[in-house]
Image: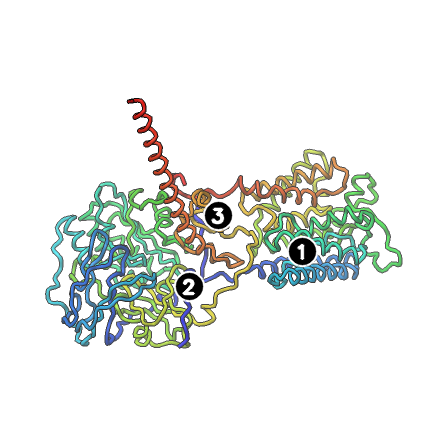
Amino acid sequence: MKLHGIRVAHKKNTANCAPERLVIPKSVTIPMSMHIGKPANIAVHKGDDVKVGQLIGEADGFVSSNIHASVSGEVRQITERLNAHGQKIPCVVIEADGRQEKYEKLAPPQVTDFESFVKAVKDSGVVGLGGAGFPSFVKLNVYNLPAVEAVVINAAECEPYITSDTRTMLDKGEYVFKGIEAIRRYMGVKRFIIGIENNKKEVIEKMKALAKETEDVEIHVLPSIYPQGGEKVLVYNTVGRIIPKGGLPLDVGVIVINVTTLAFVAEYLETGFPLVEKCLTIDGSAVKTPKNVIAPIGMSIRDLIESAGGLKTEPSKILYGGPMMGISVPSMDEPVLKNTNAVIFMDKKEAAPPKTTACIGCGACAAHCPFRLDPRAIAKAYRLDDGAALKALCVDLCMECGCCSYVCPAHRPLVQTNVLGKGKLKEYLFSQQALQKQETKARQQEQKKKGGADNE
Amino acid sequence: MNKLISSVSPHFFSRRSTRTIMLDVIIALLPTAIASVIIFGLRSLLIIGVCVAGCMVSEFLFEKLCKRENTIGDLSAVVTGLLLAYNLPVSIPVWQAVFGSVTAIIVVKQLFGGIGQNFANPAITARIVMMTAFSGSMTNWVAPFTAKMPDAVSSATPLTAAAKGTVSMMPSYLDLFLGRHAGCLGETCVLTLLLGGIYLIIRRVITWHTPVVYLATFALLSLICGKDVLYQLMSGGLLLGAIFMATDYATTPSTVWGKVIFGAGCGLITILIRFWGNLPEGVSFSILIMNILTPYIMKLTRNRPLTGGVEP
């Protein structure tokens, strides 16, 4: 069985651009939530002097992440701002002194076993750098280690434009393998698979050459069909197992980790220097020269593009991430986040949304869905407010890859309706649960009454 | 600074639209139009023009009347007009062609909600209505290459000739392939219809499943019935129907297995009508009947989500 997907234009214009280090901006704004989970607790005060790599946000709770200063300077302000998801997030604004002094207490972590390895990953502040932003230490902190049969390293990079993972593998390929060694040593995993799309010939060659020097690392060349880098798609295409609905890769004995995340972990184990800067791709129709850059986290998009060569025209849309699943940002003041792997500037023509027309029933949406959902039926169920139908159609399986919306000749908002449908399904399930509770309560009361009557 | 557009992903779309799909179908139908002019003379151009214009004007006026959005830009009315014209004999009176166009667009398509909402193929249904209403002029077949003569010579289609057993009226395989015989103006030329079909499959507008299964079922069953398979395949509206009308999006299944069932059903019904029915031809009715069954076929063949064994 083959999973469906779409062939999108690759637009990997920047694959050959070695990342360029940008000039440090005058100030950075670092949000306390650049990850999935609870925002970090602010660990500094207004007026404090901070140095590069110093902890400014402490992981709060089970799923959270540490946050470090990306520039040296003075904490100017502690504010709140809306993130791209519409949540109010506390932020630390640091005015840079331009000296970029490293925090003197930073030292390579002492890693001897699994616990200290997970702690090191936690201390590094790394989150899923492929774009998801899930705190990596939570993912690696597996209770039942022997259950992990394989680690799949996600190097598919299936989104158009983005080449930051490509650059990781070309420039820091050795670290990818050092990361593999660390996982092998501290987690006891035996099998490693690196999944790469076949549009990255140079990368595949390099990784194959490196893989020869070590054992049990397979380089899996995948067809360039979006969404090859989707976790479930990648796991199916590399180890042939379907992750059950609502489950994790761990349910089929696999951990999936992004290649840049892994390389960073390995680098951290060597240097002890936390995640404070990010290699990202700057591209899009409004950009003067597409390139890869290394930017400090918290740098505003305005500073970023000015420092990276400027714009050709006024952008109409700016994206964090690729055009298939990226998030459009409301303003140029938004900061670069940990999980930002690209910033795409679209001109008016590229950003113009296509006109939505009536569904002609071609079935392209269902024929291209990797999980074989039927977006047309889901849209109908959503319109009819039919929770039971949404449940039967498994709308909660949708990973929002956007293939359906991409292929629709009528340009209907299909994936968008799926997202709304997920919300409606949740509501429906809640109401079903409440109903059930009420029923059992009523039954119990009735039984009680009966019991009482019998006693009399 | 202008305001940035904020929208949910994806931010990138395929360039294919309803309009480009319909344009592809029109391109695929064009060689057949040329063939019909060569075979039946310039009057076929008049009929094609009348049907296309009739369909577009009906759509435009109806949408104006109902204050709906004007959709003639998507070119689907042009496709309906072309297909309707291809299903008419060249000698059809112009007013009857106009009547057919109005029926196709207003009664079959717009009254059910417009593009994508109709349950039956507009061109086919209009043809069936016209066959019932104007049975005389709808079966007034004209022999090819006789357009310039003062009185068009009446002729028999290959199927009526075969049904009556008049061997002298039965065209050769080559004549069938090139369309040099009496019939509806767009159904005779096998060559151009096949070219159009191949174009549509290459352009991924249609998949091969429906036409191939339809023709294969038909060929197999006519072989079992002891008929001349090649003759039967190349005569009547079989190819026109199998390639262009059994593959209409709105009125046929969109799943692979649905297409297979649809094609097989069409093949079976065509055989039943051709060999045992009262009519010489059964393509229109077979497609219409399968159109009606389409929602059930879709229910039967819907994709199963890959839940990894978890119940929904």
Does A372 sit above or below residue B57?
above
Residue holding disc 2: B7
Q: Chain of mark 3?
A: A
Q: Secondary structure at mark 1?
A: helix
The residues tagged by marks 3 and 2 sit, at their Cα atoms, a distance apart of 23 Å
Figure quadrant of the C terminus of chain A:
top left
Q: Residues within 10 Å of mark 3 (few under 14, many from 20)?
A: some
**Between B132 and B25, the one nearer to me in the picture:** B132
Mark 1 or mark 2, which has the lower sequence index? 2
Task: Please provide percent x and percent y for residue A135.
Answer: 25, 55
| Residue A381's disc number | 3
The residues tagged by marks 1 and 3 sit, at their Cα atoms, a distance apart of 30 Å
Q: Are marks 1 and 3 on the same chain?
A: no
Q: Secondary structure at mark 2?
A: loop
Q: Nearer the viewer, mark 3 or mark 2?
A: 3
Task: Please provide percent x and percent y for residue B74.
Answer: 60, 61
Q: Chain of mark 2?
A: B
Can you see residue A222?
Answer: yes
Does A364 sit above or below residue A350?
above
Q: Which of the 4 image quarters holds residue A145?
A: top left
Query: Marks 3 and 1: in contact by CB < 8 Å?
Result: no
Amino acid at pointer 2? Ser
Residue holding disc 1: B80
Amino acid at pointer 3? Ala
Q: Are marks 3 and 2 on the same chain?
A: no
Q: Nearer the viewer, mark 1 or mark 2?
A: 2
Task: Please provide percent x and percent y for residue A1.
Answer: 44, 43
Q: Secondary structure at mark 3?
A: helix
